[in-house]
Image (cartoon, grey):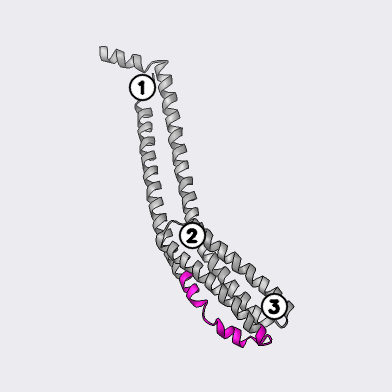
Amino acid sequence: MAKSTARTGFFSSPWLTLARIAFTGIFFFWLYWIGISTKDLDDKINAASDRYTAIDTLLIEYKSEIQEWKDLLLRSNSRDTLNRNWLGYEAQYRKVASAAQDIIANNDVRSINQKMTSFADAHKANYDQYKSSVFLLIKNKYYPGPADSAVKGIDRPLLDILQSANEDMREEKNRTNASLIAQARNRIEQSLFALGFIGLLAIWMPKH
């Protein structure tokens, strides 16, 4: 009888009101936590996707640089046209070089960084070779054959490096996404358990 009286006293106003307010606050907090977990998952997956897209975009830009060089050989028939075309090629070269350095700076996967560093070094070496071959173009009165032969095939190893780095990034993205999804699922399961517990308390709490 004493226990019943004590129990009733505890759950009577104002204790019952405070308990309900507390449980309501906890309930909405866990709903908020589920939303935060989901948004955090989206943000991290998007960040991983951006890193993958960066290498894919770099591959496209490097192909554009190769095309700029081909256009220079075919369209330069005087010193003026050569200067204009060289400026176009050089601008694309610098764009690619900058993008490669950005990927290295914002990536923490060792194998990918090693490949991107190799690409950046080879890219600079190729630029020097292209620059030297311009003198062959001038020497041969803008006939592109000798200049083209001097640099023939030097772009292929760099394309292979980017393709390999792209594949590594795809695998890393899949691993990262799987880990992030597992973490988010664990958080959500914990939150749902807490919500279920609060719901049971609300059901079994004395109404008066």
Residue designated by label 2: 104
Distance, label 2 to label 3, CA atoms, is: 33 Å
In the image, 63 versus 200, the foreground residue is 63
Residue designated by label 1: 206
The range drawn in magenta is 138-162
Residue 35, image x and y in percent?
A: 47, 42
Instruction: State the SS at label 1.
Output: loop
Residue 71 position (above or below residue 44) = below
Q: Does 147 lie within the magenta span? A: yes
Left or right relative to 105: residue 138: right
Residue 154 position (above or below residue 26) = below
In the picture, the disc for residue 140 is none
In the image, 19 versus 169, the foreground residue is 169
Q: Amino acid at mark 1?
A: Pro
Left or right relative to 164: residue 3: left
Quadrant assignment, res 190: top left
In the picture, the disc for residue 82 is 3
